[in-house]
Image (tube, rainbow, N blue to C red):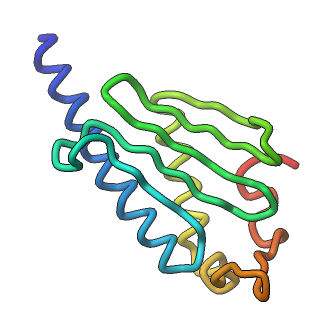
């Protein structure tokens, strides 16, 4: 029984790694700063670190590995929310839906000094102010 459960968990980690890579690419295409770093050679899906900058010093980080799954949301360098396991995956899904919605895409633009992010666009979308 335990070897089967371990293999299922490795499969979940692999699926999450692939999804995080696709999400980072999708957000980058919409002008939202996002990165996904994969652990190891990238083929085995042992883990990944996903980070998205939501503007106004607001960022999210999702870590997945053979050791666990976690979600951390912070603003101005202070941790606001930390979730693990299934709750972390649910929050990632919720945020991905918000960021990939047409409303977020319409207001998203490449961020530069001449084109700063609109802090009202995503404010309060993830945590209460």
Furthest-right residue in this view: 129
In the image, residue 110 above or below residue 23: below
Left or right of residue 57, residue 37 in this image: left
- Name the residue located 32 percent from the left edge and 41 percent from the top edge: 39
In the image, residue 15 above or below residue 103: above
Furthest-top residue in this view: 2
- Name the residue located 62 percent from the left edge and 49 percent from the top edge: 60
- Name the residue located 36 percent from the left edge and 22 percent from the top edge: 67
Q: Quadrant of the N terminus?
A: top left
Query: In which image quadrant can residue 54 be found?
Result: bottom right
- Between residues 124 and 52, which one lies in front from this camera angle? 52
- Give coordinates of residue 121: x percent, y percent: 77, 72
Left or right of residue 22, residue 114 in this image: right
- Give coordinates of residue 108: x percent, y percent: 65, 80
- Give coordinates of residue 33: x percent, y percent: 59, 67
- Between residues 106 and 109, which one lies in front from this camera angle? 109
- Give coordinates of residue 64: x percent, y percent: 40, 36
- Name the residue located 12 percent from the left edge and 20 percent from the top edge: 4
Left or right of residue 91, residue 85 in this image: left
In the image, residue 105 above or below residue 12: below
Query: In which image quadrant can residue 40 be found?
Result: top left
Q: How many marks?
A: 0
């Amino acid at each position: 029984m335990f070897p089967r459960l371990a293999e299922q968990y490795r499969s979940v980690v692999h699926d999450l790694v692939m999804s995080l890579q696709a999400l980072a690419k999708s957000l980058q295409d919409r002008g939202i700063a996002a990165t996904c770093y994969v652990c190891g050679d990238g083929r085995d899906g042992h883990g990944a670190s996903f980070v998205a900058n939501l503007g106004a010093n607001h960022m999210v980080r999702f870590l997945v590995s053979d050791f666990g799954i976690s979600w951390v949301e912070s603003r101005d360098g202070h941790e606001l929310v930390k979730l693990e396991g299934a709750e972390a995956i649910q929050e990632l899904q919720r945020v991905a839906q918000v960021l990939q919605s047409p409303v977020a895409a319409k207001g998203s633009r490449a961020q530069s000094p001449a084109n700063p992010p609109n802090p009202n666009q995503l404010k309060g979308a993830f945590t209460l102010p």
